[in-house]
């Protein structure tokens, strides 16, 4: 090989060797955006031509795929959706910055999966980090100038925040409709959803006057005065075993041991549902019973099923996907005098069950 050609090849190889890490380091990870308000997600980049396929709540984090005119293309519920870009912002540049603290030493990864993505750093116990939002069980964080991911259960909203051991998970029940926030302060942290009255949630610990809860595969915070211990509800509910059935220490027959057995017809205090399981209070302990082996709920010692509450439309009125006329699409219409099952309230809206669908109606258009 001529010396000149050899020199060129050698120089190219050396350049490639030194540039490869730089190129790899420059590869951009998935980008994210955060909703600045509740907003519809559409099937295409035009509100007049494309229907809403869902919505984002204020503060919700989504994977950003690019632009289409004035619209942002996002990854939404295992599909593609479009949101008007004006209602999204880069989570790093939020007007109010949020922080979390490592409850123990924990890895920061380049993506939300410990089996697929490498470690890019390690947080020390109680180390503070900028928190951008949640992607399922993982927290998106801003770490030393880069986007990173930390498994959510290893982060808390304040240093030294009290935790409930996972083996002794406790539960709380909402005494009214109430917002769930991303941190323990209503003026600093956005709402990421809400609980309806009577909804049961796993309680993870306290942060001042706030309760830390497990909410939709993530962590949320609710003002503690709106939650109560389900065992001590003012009105107690009971259910009956339709056949002999095990009571377990957790809601999974393969993972949790049997702690007791209900006889056919035996009464047990019913606290609420956790998936397909009923949370019960039996002989001084919390336990779980597979729902299909229990009869309907009853009040006190009565065997009559707990009555449902119904409301009637005082005029023809829309039923919407969420509690707001500006941001949530119409999914049905109640005619004047038509009946619907009432489930709870959220601000000036009522949550109802209508023809098998969960929806919301402006309360002033309903009568009992």
Image (tube, helix red, strand yellow):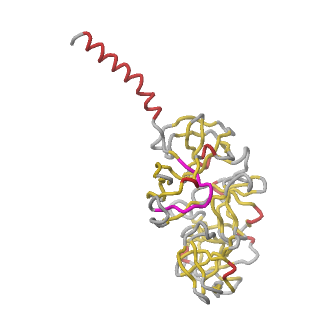
**Residue 139 placement (x, y as % from top left):** 58, 48
Q: In this view, does 15 lie to the left or right of 139?
A: left
Give the residue at the far top of this rendering: 3
Residue 265 higher or lower than 118, as above or below: below
**Residue 328 placement (x, y as % from top left):** 57, 68
Q: What stretch is highlighted in magenta?
A: 32-42
Residue 109 higher or lower than 68, as above or below: above
> Magenta span has 73?
no
Using the rendered view, name the quadrant where residue 5 is placed: top left
**Residue 345 placement (x, y as % from top left):** 68, 74
- Between 48 and 138, the one lying in front of the other is 48
The residue drawn where x is 71% and y is 60% is 222
Give the residue at the far bottom of this rendering: 337
The residue drawn where x is 47% and y is 67% is 51
Quarter of the picture holding the N terminus: top left
Residue 358 higher or lower than 85, as above or below: below
Using the rendered view, name the quadrant where residue 327 is placed: bottom right
How many numbered badges does the structure rendering display? 0
Residue 160 higher or lower than 210, as above or below: above
The residue drawn where x is 44% and y is 60% is 44
> Magenta span has 40?
yes
Quarter of the picture holding the C terminus: bottom right
- Between 332 and 161, the one lying in front of the other is 332
- Between 241 and 148, the one lying in front of the other is 148
- Between 98 and 110, the one lying in front of the other is 98
**Residue 72 placement (x, y as % from top left):** 50, 53
Main secondary structure of the magenta stretch: strand
Using the rendered view, name the quadrant where residue 6 is placed: top left
């Amino acid at each position: 090989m001529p010396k000149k050609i050899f020199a060129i090849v050698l120089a190219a190889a050396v350049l490639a060797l030194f540039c490869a890490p730089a190129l790899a380091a420059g590869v951009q990870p998935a980008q994210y955006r955060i909703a600045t308000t509740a907003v519809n997600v559409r099937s295409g980049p035009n509100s007049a031509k494309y229907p809403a396929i869902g919505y984002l709540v204020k503060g919700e984090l989504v994977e950003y795929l690019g632009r289409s005119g004035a619209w942002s293309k996002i990854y939404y519920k295992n599909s593609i959706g479009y949101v008007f870009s004006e209602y999204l912002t880069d989570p790093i540049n939020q007007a109010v910055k949020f922080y979390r603290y490592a409850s123990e030493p924990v890895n920061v990864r380049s993506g939300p999966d410990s089996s697929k993505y490498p470690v890019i750093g390690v947080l020390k116990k109680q180390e503070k980090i900028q928190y951008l939002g949640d992607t399922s069980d993982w927290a998106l964080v801003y770490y030393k100038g880069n986007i990173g991911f930390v498994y959510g259960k290893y982060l808390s909203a304040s240093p030294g925040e009290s935790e409930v051991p996972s083996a002794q998970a406790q539960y709380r029940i909402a005494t009214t409709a109430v917002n769930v926030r991303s941190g323990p302060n209503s003026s600093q942290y956005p709402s990421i959803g809400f609980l309806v009255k009577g909804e049961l949630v796993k309680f993870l610990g306290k942060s001042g006057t706030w309760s830390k809860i497990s909410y939709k595969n993530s962590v949320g915070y609710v003002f503690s005065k709106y939650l109560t211990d389900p065992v001590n509800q003012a009105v107690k509910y009971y259910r009956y075993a339709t056949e002999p059935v095990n009571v377990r220490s957790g809601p999974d027959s393969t993972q949790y041991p049997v702690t007791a057995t209900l006889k056919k017809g035996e009464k047990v205090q019913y606290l609420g549902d956790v998936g397909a399981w009923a949370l019960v209070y039996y002989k001084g302990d919390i336990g779980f019973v597979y729902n299909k082996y229990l009869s309907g709920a009853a009040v006190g010692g009565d065997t009559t099923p707990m009555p449902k509450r119904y409301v009637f439309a005082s005029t023809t009125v829309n039923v919407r996907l969420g509690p707001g006329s500006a941001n949530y699409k119409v999914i049905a219409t109640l005619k004047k005098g038509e009946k619907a099952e009432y489930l709870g309230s959220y601000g000036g809206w009522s949550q109802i069950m209508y023809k098998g669908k969960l929806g919301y109606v402006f309360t002033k258009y309903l009568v009992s």
